[in-house]
Amino acid sequence: MWSIMRTRARTMTRFVLTQSFLPVSPNLCNISPLLHCSPSSVSLGLTGSSSSCEVSGRPFFSRSFSGLQTMAEDSVTYLSQRAAAEIDETLMGPLGFSVVQLMELAGLSVAASIAETYKPSEYKRVLAICGPGNNGGDGLVAARHLYHFGYKPFVCYPKRTPKALYTGLVTQLESLSIPFLSVEDLPSDLSKDFDVLVDAMFGFSFHGAPRPPFENLIQRLVSLHRDDTAGRKSPVIVSVDIPSGWHVEEGDVSGEGIKPDMLVSLTAPKLCAKHFCGPHHFLGGRFVPPSIAEKYKFQLPPYPGTSMCVRIGKVPQIDLSAMRETYVSPEFLEEQVEANPFEQFNKWFKDAVAAGLREPNAMALSTAGKNGKLSSRMVLLKGVDEDGFVWYTNYGSRKAHELSENPWASLLFYWDGLNRQVRVEGFAEKVSDHESEQYFLSRPRGSQIGAVVSDQSSVVPGRQALHQQYKELEEKFSSMSVIPKPKHWGGYRLKPELFEFWQGQPSRLHDRLQYTPQEIDGKQVWKIVRLAP
Ligand SMILES: Cc1cc2nc3c(=O)[nH]c(=O)nc-3n(C[C@H](O)[C@H](O)[C@H](O)COP(=O)(O)O)c2cc1C
């Protein structure tokens, strides 16, 4: 992308001025600059739908499955070459972006998409094959970010562009000691030396036949795919915006082109993306302002949180048996831990907060009534000290009934990203009414009304009934500055009798340190033992 040369840019500006940006009707698909069409073939289902595309059997790991929002591909906007060029022109013209900025964000999106899907623990060695234009620049930027994400990038950049933007990118990569490989330096069999191949040769403005050495490089990527079908392990291919050699609108016309495993569409997918059959289609380039999105009637999935990429379409068929993480953590040794498990918990909790994990105070609470049947649910830790772990809830809820019959309960924290879990077991009792009141008063007004409304765990006639009740109470309390805590709402404190601190390690040789109370010479101490993983 960003492949319009300065001289062309002037021509394009004139062109844009004479074009109408009015939305076009879908039945004008073949002449309109942007289309909202159904992809002809792609249907990659979670449940193994009758897809005409083959899904690679390689294990994959993607936050998309759990965290990122996805959008059905049949409702996504696809851009023609002309519309893509117009958008670039608008971004770099009236909207004030520079090519440097857009390239940086595009390259970051590519690196983020790779990191979402191919973990460096398994796909460490990345070769970025970069063309002479801006698509190649995106590849150079991606290589730099991948280095910082923990990958080992290599760059093949056979036709260097002598502009400051590109020479600067090369210098940045060289300063990171990222090797530049000439075409001749490349091993004859790319599959032995690389886990990921980034195809950043040509972008959406390319047309015509690829010239040497790119024609040969494209063929090498194509032949890798052929080897793959013969059952040999191949690196995955990630194409930046357009699979190089494909027609920007018609796709792989000859059927003999690159078949990428991942396509990272920048700004919006180009028409050729309708023919992409790989398992991972991502959108990147998180800089499109609403004016462009509205003008071009963009229908694209929203970027989640602070992410620089978002999956388009469904996640591919999931092989649960192949989903496993390799944990790499520092050693967790008996000599390092705090003698007091509350202090150890505080230490790890601070780490979880510092790591920016979402809701590190979320914990699974398991209870069992007198019939011994267990139930678990998440609650939020709202206080912890040597007296125990505190959470708040409804005293009429299922958990409360079970605790009234059997106060023994367990808590479980899981801090993904730190490879840590903490188990806490003990007995729970209600906190004082005063303590519950203090906390209730600190809650946002909406949560206070919600607590009054909800007869937690009881059957309700429908959503509407809850909202109606909420509205009525909002009116009732409108003149009151303080909403009184309802009697049925309050806290529990679990007094621990066992802690276990778990840290994931390679080869499933995880660390598990368990604390239980012991009396030694009339003094209460915590005994620490290591458990087999
Ligand atoms: C992350 C998370 C935090 C939650 N925190 C609380 C909480 O602090 N208190 C609470 O009563 N319910 C909380 N819930 C809702 C509970 O999981 C559960 O649905 C509710 O308490 C009813 O459970 P029960 O019917 O087993 O009593 C939370 C849910 C999630 C997903």
Image (cartoon, rainbow, N blue to C red):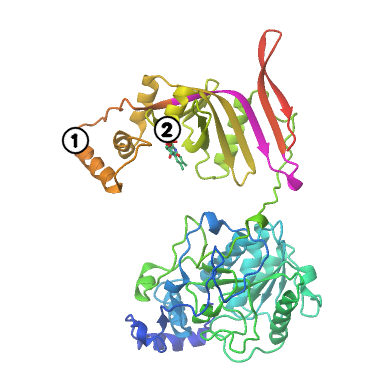
Q: Which structural element holds mark 2?
A: helix
The residue drawn where x is 73% and y is 85% is 216
Residue 257 is situated, as x and y percent measured from the top left of the image, at: 64, 84
Give the residue type at disc 2: Arg
Q: Characterize the local packing of mark 2: few (<14), some (14-19) or many (20 or more) Cα atoms within 10 angstroms.
A: some
Instruction: Tell me which label, 2 or 1, sits earlier in the chain.
Output: 2
Tell me: 220 left or right of 2.
right
In which image quadrant can residue 135 be found?
bottom right
Q: On the rendered image, what quadrant is the C terminus found in?
A: top right
Whether residue 506 appears in magenta in the rendering, the answer is: yes
Q: Which residues are magenta?
A: 492-510
Give the residue type at disc 1: Lys
**Residue picked out by circle 1:** 476
Residue 74 is situated, as x and y percent measured from the top left of the image, at: 44, 73
Residue 232 is situated, as x and y percent measured from the top left of the image, at: 77, 72
Residue 363 is situated, as x and y percent measured from the top left of the image, at: 52, 37
Question: In the rendered view, would you say 382 is above or below 54?
Answer: above
Q: Characterize the local packing of mark 1: few (<14), some (14-19) or many (20 or more) Cα atoms within 10 angstroms.
A: few
Q: Which mark is residue 398?
A: 2
Q: On the rendered image, what quadrant is the N terminus found in?
A: bottom right
Mark 2 close to ligand 1, CB under 8 Å: yes
In which image quadrant can residue 114 be found?
bottom right
